[in-house]
Amino acid sequence: MRNVIVIAGICMLLSGCAATAGDLSPAPPSTAASRWVVSAGTTLKSDAVATSADIAPLAVGAQVLVLENAGRWLKVQTAAQKTGWVFAGRLALTPPVAEVAISDDLLSASARQSQIEVAQADSARSIRGLSAETENYARERGTPQEYRQALDRILARQVSQDEVTAFMRAGKLGEYAQ
């Protein structure tokens, strides 16, 4: 009797699967997946190599269609119908979101907020020296002026895109990795 119940259960399970399966032919190939540019300075390349010729610059937030996946490089098509290669680390599965910058003035922080476009978000934005509150705190704690000046000099340093590229090439980082 127990075997009959088990066999009947299996038959019902199989008939349910067959009824819901419908057409078992292979699914048509999926359409190209969308990705979004999330890194400033991204360019469409002629080959899947960082040193290949640039085809066109890609703005942060630009949507591209992935045509081929070659590991760390993706062959994509832009909205302008240009096709080329992009390092996968410069693209995301979701569109970038705007960043909210809050004023240094604590009283007006809730009243004033500004949207910074992702394309403008880079390390240069953070180079602004000490805020008035931090200056007062350092003064109250007796931090020597020479330390504050040294920090200001460090914060004022800027690194060019060429220096970043040279660093990445030398260190075999990002799209220059092998």
Image (tube, helix red, strand yellow):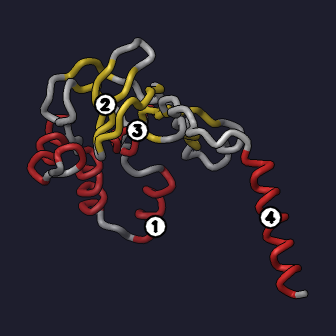
The residue labelled by disc 4 is 13
Q: Quadrant of the N terminus?
A: bottom right
- The alpha-carbon separation of the residues under discs 1 and 2 comes to 45 Å
> At 21% across and 41% down in the image, what residue appears?
159
- The alpha-carbon separation of the residues under discs 1 and 4 comes to 76 Å
Relative to residue 104, is residue 85 depicted above or below? Answer: above
- Mark 1 or 2, nearer chain start: 2
Q: Position of residue 36 (x, y in %)?
A: 46, 33
> At 38% across and 43% down in the image, what residue appears?
128
- The alpha-carbon separation of the residues under discs 4 and 3 comes to 44 Å
- Mark 4 or 3, nearer chain start: 4
Q: Which three-letter amino acid code belongs to the residue tagged 4?
A: Leu
- Looking at the image, the residue that sits furthest to the left is 170
Quarter occupied by residue 15: bottom right
- The alpha-carbon separation of the residues under discs 3 and 2 comes to 9 Å
- Mark 3 or 1, nearer chain start: 3
Disc 3 element: strand
Q: Position of residue 77 (x, y in %)?
A: 39, 22
Say the numbered circle drawn on residue 140: 1
Q: Are marks 1 and 2 in contact (CB under 8 Å)?
A: no
